[in-house]
Amino acid sequence: MFTLGDICLSRILTALMISVASLMSTRLRDALISRAEYLLHTVDPLNYNTPRRIVQFLRNIKYIHRPLLEKCNEIFLRNIPRLDAENISIILGLYQSLQFNNCDFRLAAKKRLTELIDTSTDPFSFSKLFVALAPIGSPDIRERLENTTLLVADEFNPQQALAVIEALEEIQSRNLSLLNNTLTDLLCCSFLQRSFYPYEVTMLTRVLSMLPSRRLDEGVVSRVDDVIAQCSLSELNTISFAVAKWIRNDPSYRHNTHSRYVRLLQRLSHCGHERLQTADRLDLLLEELKYVSGEWFEEMLLDETFVTLKRMIDQINPSNVSDLAFFLTRTNHLYPPVMDRIASVATEHIDEVPA
């Protein structure tokens, strides 16, 4: 009979871990983590792909196992001189998703990325470097990166430009000329017309709303309308923020109550209600709600959200009770049926609730 103990190659184990992440029980999770801890001691210290896949697995199952993370981090630190900007960016992103903040790795990554500035001269490597270094760099480093971006912006392809824009937004850059040069209206709109993925359309819509004096045009409305039914609640919320910005910047809105803005907001609300009414897995719903906030959500979808949560009340369990409690706290909304269920699950399974 085959057991996890028969797996002696870390490459095979990590492939298994990632492939079964969405289907596993607590018992299987613990067995995989135990085997991973053992095999990490046998891994070539120069092989940083294995610990990276292990951290990816922990991110996928939303589980913080600090002893295993620390062991992976030790291997990353030994390999810092060999890591490029893309790998460092991936590791930092995984750590951020897990809320695992290791100062030693962050400092080492910052030093390594700074060393790579002079050699990251092509659009591909520089965009990877910008995404990784801008959020953790000093003000002087950020200014240096932004000045370089002005010089190479015209060479970015749409994906690279989007990545840089996201980093600029993360650091709350106020360099509007950089925004305009990094992702011009022409680039953004042409790429928007070719985009079929909700994430891409949502991101491009948000970027367009960030550009100075940018108004909503029919081409943008048409593209958003094509994919809006496929958007998650988080993506719908992001588009609502973009529409709100356009409304504030367009004085004609006050004289046209049947404008494209109103039609788009109505469509957003309809799709949001439909997504809530057809949702059938609480864990997936909580993932979509994690970063949702703002007036549009509170006015249009909050009540329907709690109707949906009540419908899924039997799915509340030790693994999701913390996320659900955080959502209630963030919305400052008291809903006794759900609160009672949270209290019951937390009390009965106190040792299983994630810290």
Image (cartoon, rainbow, N blue to C red):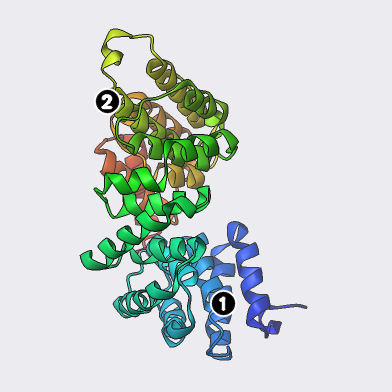
Q: Find residue 191 and report its horizontal and vertical position in percent.
A: 54, 39
Which comes sooner in the sequence, label 2 or label 1? Answer: 1
Q: Identify the amino acid type marked 2.
A: Asn
Q: Quadrant of the C terminus?
A: bottom left
| Tag 1 secondary structure | helix
Which one is in front, 315 or 63?
63
Residue 273: give x, y in percent of width and height.
Answer: 46, 25
Classify 100 as above or below 335. below
The answer to whether residue 145 is above or below residue 296 is: below
Residue beneath the point at 53% across and 80% down: 48
- Position in image of residue 312 (x %, y %): 48, 38
| Residue 296 rendering spot, x and y as whole percentages | 33, 28
Is residue 61 rendered to the left or right of residue 215?
right
Q: Nearer the viewer, residue 35 or 135?
A: 135
Which residue is the site of mark 1?
49
State how far apart marks 2 and 1 are (Cα).
47 Å
Foreground residue among 251 and 206: 251
Instruction: Please name the residue shown 44% across and 85% down the image.
Output: 81
Residue hosting label 2: 249
